[in-house]
Image (tube, grey):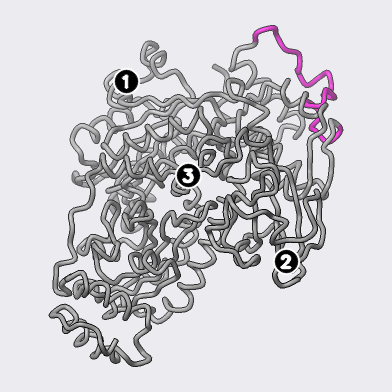
Amino acid sequence: MANAPHSPAMAVARERLGEAGGLEGAPIPLVIARSWRRCADRGLRADRPAHQDPLPRADLAALRDRHHTLMHLATPELDTLHRAMRDLGGMVLLTNDRGLILDARGDAGFVRRARRVSLQPGAGWGEDDEGTNAVGTALAERALVQVRGPEHYLTDNAFLICTAMPVTDPYGAVAGVIDLSGDTRHPRADAHGPDAQALARLAVAHLEHRWAVRAAEGHEALIRLHAHPAWLGTPQEGLLAVDDGIIQAANPAALTLLGLGNEALGRVRLDSVLSGGLERGDRLVRTVAEDRPLHARMTTPGKRRPSTSRPSARRPARQDQGMTAGRDGILWDATTRPLLDRAILALDAGIPILLQGETGSGKEVFVRAAHAACGRAQAPLVAVNCAAIPEGLLESELFGYEDGAFTGARRGGHRGQIRQADGGILFLDEIGDMPPALQARLLRVLQDGEVTPVGGRPVKVDFLLVTATHRDLAACVAQGTFRADLYYRLKHLVVTLPPLRDRPLDAIIDALLASFGADDRGIRLAPATRTLLRRHDWPGNLRELANLLRTLVALSPPGALITPADLPADLAGRAPKDLGTATHPTPSLKAREDDAIRQALARHRGNVSAAARELGVHRSTLHRRLRPD
């Protein structure tokens, strides 16, 4: 550093870092000094404003679409980190491999301050864009980086304390960065240090582990490695996908265990680094270089690829084509993924969405996934089930009320769900069950852009509306039970989620079983069991199937074979004759749903709450279905 060329930018760097502890001294990490040198060599001015124009909505939507696998896999980690950062008043970010922010969520006050320096979706935070910062420097160093206060190159960013960890895909390419950012002036800023680094490492390890498991689908073998057998099956294990004896894909943990670099993928034979060969099940193997023992478990996750050529490092050939199960049982495949992509584009363009689908098809989970990937991800998502709230309370819940508006009103009033969704997304589930009087009030809110609480004055609101129903709204309009003018306000983009009977059931069963840990525990379905599952009508759709498989896996010991005897009586053909199980050649959807409700109530001796839990619906839905027409 002593012989470094002098420049005005480096002079500013020396002055600012000198105030913080000295450029050459121990208090300034070498990684920060290297980054400042790179910025100075580029001629970047430290006093340059940090503000930049983020990508337009359409361009941001296209960018997210190109990286939707990364975004989908990162969603659980971002949710977890968001909760962990709540007490620190900060935010969590996901960027692509160039530092462009794909997703951001966090404390509302910090989000507003962060926008002043363009710490928001669509903005670029590579070193070329913002100088020394955690995201850009982590990408440059390919390592975990923390940048505190004045260590940021741009003066405008000196209030930030940020920790970033690169995410590596299973083919050795840096796919993006997870970043935790906060304010150095926050009372708990000191807690951001080691805690944030540990959180970032753990989140990335979980993401890379799931990505490697997903990439292994279709390879000849998946090998799990760890020095201790108890760690097999956890995010800390090493994962290798192997074809024809060649390591095709891996997570960083596996490469570290074997002392390999990313360049080994697609080139190095497994027997050149591990002795013991390929055999199914658990066994002890040894590293060739150090003769170090490792515990290994080999499985065959699927059919082999027709070609063993290495996929593109930027976008592996299979990563978006297979069936993948998300939380709550919804599955993203060639049927549902395009629907989600269109919904995200619509939300980013400010277009209302009307979701249609049978009970249990995953409408609310679909909305939450679309919200997490759209431009309002850091804004609230407020979900209201219009069928689950009594008619007398729905008005005050939706529109709010002022203090003293009526007898029994909450002291201080209630903002209402519409105002709580201001700036974000309001999701009205079962919109077809909304009373006509409230339909008129909702229409007025959509027309005027303001809501009037009970006993109060109009208040301006800005929200995107997503509605859902299992009813045929066009038929409801024809019958006079739903307002035509509101219907046409809602149906800008209509997304119809397919019922389970119209989807590839075998692939869905396999994906759900894998998501519930059946593969890791060696749990399988007997052929006769699978046949019975195929024959079932599944009136509760994905929710019903997911609930059943989750229960079967949870109750089965490792290595178990699930037989027809393990299935509920109606599925196994053992239902008592008095449960009304007789079916017609072509029963209607309502008839099938009513039949499932009758069976559930019979099994639980009329207990509506227990029957609702089994069917995966709210008990108010059952009460409504039990009312005479």
Which residue is denoted by mark 3 in the rendering? 312
Amino acid bearing label 1? Arg
Closer to the observer: label 3 or label 1?
3
In this picture, residue 153 sits left or right of residue 198: left
In this picture, residue 268 sits left or right of residue 166: right
CA–CA distance in space, label 2 to label 1: 70 Å
- At 24% from the left and 72% from the top, the residue drawn is 39
Q: Earlier in the sequence, mark 3 or mark 1?
A: 3
Residue 282: quadrant of the picture: bottom right
Which residue is denoted by mark 1 in the rendering? 483
User: Does the CB distance between marks 3 and 1 fall below 8 Å?
Assistant: no
In this picture, residue 485 sits left or right of residue 386: left
Residue 605 or residue 75, whichever sits in front: 75
For label 2, the SS is strand
Q: Position of residue 41 (x, y in %)?
A: 22, 73
- Crowding at label 3, few (<14), some or many (≥20) Cα neighbours within 10 Å? few
For label 3, the SS is loop
Q: Position of residue 578 (x, y in %)?
A: 81, 19
Residue 248 or residue 566, whichever sits in front: 248
- At 83% from the left and 26% from the top, the residue drawn is 528
Amino acid bearing label 3? Ser
Kindly tell me whether residue 299 is visible in this rendering. Answer: yes
Amino acid bearing label 2? Thr
Residue 546: quadrant of the picture: top right
Q: Earlier in the sequence, mark 2 or mark 3?
A: 2
Which residue is denoted by mark 2 in the rendering? 287
Query: Quadrant location of the N terminus?
Result: bottom left
Residue 423 on the magenta segment: no
Query: Quadrant location of the C terminus?
Result: top right
Residue 165: quadrant of the picture: bottom left
Q: Main secondary structure of the magenta part?
A: loop
Q: Which residues are magenta?
A: 565-586
